[in-house]
Image: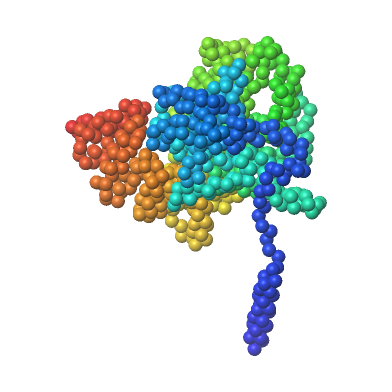
Amino acid sequence: MRRSLWLGLLAGLLLSILAGIALIHSHGGPEAPPPPSYVGQAICGQCHQSEAKAWEGSHHAKSMQAASEATVLGDFNDASLTVQGLTSRFFKRDGKFFVQTEGPDGAMQDFPIAYSFGLYPLQQYLVPFPGGKLQALSLAWDSRPKAQGGQHWFSLYPDERIKAGDPLHWTGRNQTWNFMCADCHSTGLVKGYDLKSDSYQTHWSDVDVACESCHGPASAHVAWAKQGSPNDQSKGFALSLKESAKGQWQAPDERGIRHWGGEPRANKAEEVCAGCHSRRRALTDGVDHSKPFLSSYVPSLLGEGLYRADGQIEDEVFEYGSFQQSKMHGAGVTCTDCHEPHGGKLRAEGNALCGQCHDAARFDSTQHHHHKPGEAGAECVSCHMPSRTYMQVHSRRDHSFRLPRPDLSQTIGVPNACTQCHSGKSDGWASQTLTGWGVKSLGTPHSGTVIWKGRTGAAGGDGELSAVAQDSAVAPIIRGTALELLARWPGSTALQAIVVGLRDSDPLVRLGAVRALDPYKPDLRRQLATALLTDPVLAVRIEAARQLAGVKTWSPELAASEQAGLAAWEATELASAERPETHLNLGALRLEQGKPAEVEAAFRTALALDPKFVPALLNLADLYRATNREAEAEQPLRQAVAASPDDADAHYALGLWLVRQKRLPEALTALGRAMVLHPEDPRYRQAYELVKQQR
């Protein structure tokens, strides 16, 4: 009786509580505030006038502008440019700007200019296309002064004729502003891509890089300013960019270098700057400023083709990956210590900028740099920030702040600052000269040698990579790169370093470690990667989910966690749904999940976006072979060879198919072509020789 009475009372109390909750909702009880929205630079400038004035003179403020007499710098007074036999013309009609050039079908057409793009040292132009696309012309205006070689039209690809249909043609997918450039040149941008119609509904709050690009949407801040809520330390922003660490820069030490004394600096500025100043993949359509950089983007590590083995810049990688390698980054230096954030100018000119932390009496002297004052060699940046030119005229400095190492040039073939300036001299001369100056760094161990061994497969590379990966004195991005390379060296030595790396406190190290699990068996991947499904950083979580995609689990709790991880991974992939690579990746996932029909559908979506996308054609052929549809594989293989005649893998895949069909003379031709195109790959020569023996 008592138990029944107690249960009845409990049920009645529960009903009362539920009724009360329903009543609260019916009367419009407390609800979560709406997410903050963008208000636009004009609103910000009403209160922050000095910052707005500085910004107005910056390149950020002119990153993208509607085409007008005031914004277009190029000569559109019936000027022309001939590149590889194709003459394009720049002219005006009815007060508007036009270019006459080759269109997507290869025919000459007149195209209107909608926007100027960038400012200095070059300016590009955007042309509207159907489906909401804006395409970036590969013909650009050199906006440097004439005395510096500027004030003329030039081609970003002067040495080759890029034909219509090529992804690099100005009408191709690699020149589509909505995907390639938009989110870093405008504020509050959302691409709004629709896969079904292959079209965009792109919108922004400011056409250029304005206040909210860095500070985030400001509607809550405006409300805070109007209400005057002194207890709200965030002032209505999801992220405060002010230095919160307690401490200060100390006087120069015995080396003549200042260091930060106090709490570790959070480097908040880098979290903001990195989104656009890095080689990365966006994980969402639009930026959530409440999330850290690595939960909005996956940055490239120091991959081959992007960076030299010693970490120097090679491809267009911007500043993040370089700065991550530097001792300055490790010492707590931030972007805004050198760059004024609103106007974008340097905090000081010339060597005085470095003199903020490096004692000028010691470092800005002939005894240190061994060059005459006023010479280029006397500038700190000449030796420690060598430059590389991109887009024909844009010189960018390496932000890894490295010591010149001509000895590494001699051993692993990387550039060095000495012979970049003294172009007629040898690397040996540079090493001898530095040795004569008493430079002690030459010949000392360098992680670049280890990364080079990892890339080339040199003997003992796994042990040295493992040592670098576990060395806490090495920058995390280098350690993560060493771990990523260990995927090429599966075994106990590599596995020991991977296990340690998966538990590292730095997300870049964890990212490299989880990628290194690729060659291992599913059970081991499950054992090691499962814990990272709940990693605080999205970039790491989705990499762990990818590793576990085809791995069976016996725990309902883990199964739910893995499904959530895979859903997140798929969502981040579909943030770039307009790219054929996305659907190739989704097809690979479906293959691991044992869903062949969905695999084929994903590959065909990739080919609908780009009928000449060779990886999708080759993978489709592999799918046909794996599902006993061998005869159907010939068509995509032939398409791949026709689409990319210089792709060795395409010829190789076709050659193997021909071998299986016992069409040996044709196979020999295809394999021979692969061997000629890529003689370094032993697979091609081995296959060729085997077929030759069978004839």
Q: In the rendered image, is residue 475 in sight?
A: no
Location of residue 69 (image quadrant): top right
Residue at the image point whose x is 43% and y is 44% from the top: 580
Residue at image point 49% right, 42% down: 133
Instruction: Give the residue furthest to the front.
Output: 94
Give the quarter of the figure containing the C terminus. Answer: top left
Residue 600 visible in the current orientation: yes
Residue placed most toward the observer, 64 or 382: 64
Residue 585, placed above or below residue 82: below
Most foreground residue, 636 or 496: 636
Q: Tell me: 236 left or right of 101.
A: right
Give the colour scheme of this rendering. Answer: rainbow
| Horizontal and vertical percent position of residue 577 | 47, 47
Q: Where residue 539 appears, x then y in whole percent?
A: 55, 46
Quadrant in the picture for the N terminus? bottom right
Q: Identify whether 306 is placed above or below 419.
A: below
Q: Going 50% across and 18% down the picture, which residue do you hit?
A: 410
Q: Quadrant of residue 511?
A: top right
Identify the residue at image location x=22%, y=34%: 666
Image location (x, y in percent) of residue 459 = 44, 29
Q: Going by the picture, which residue comes out furthest to the bottom?
A: 1
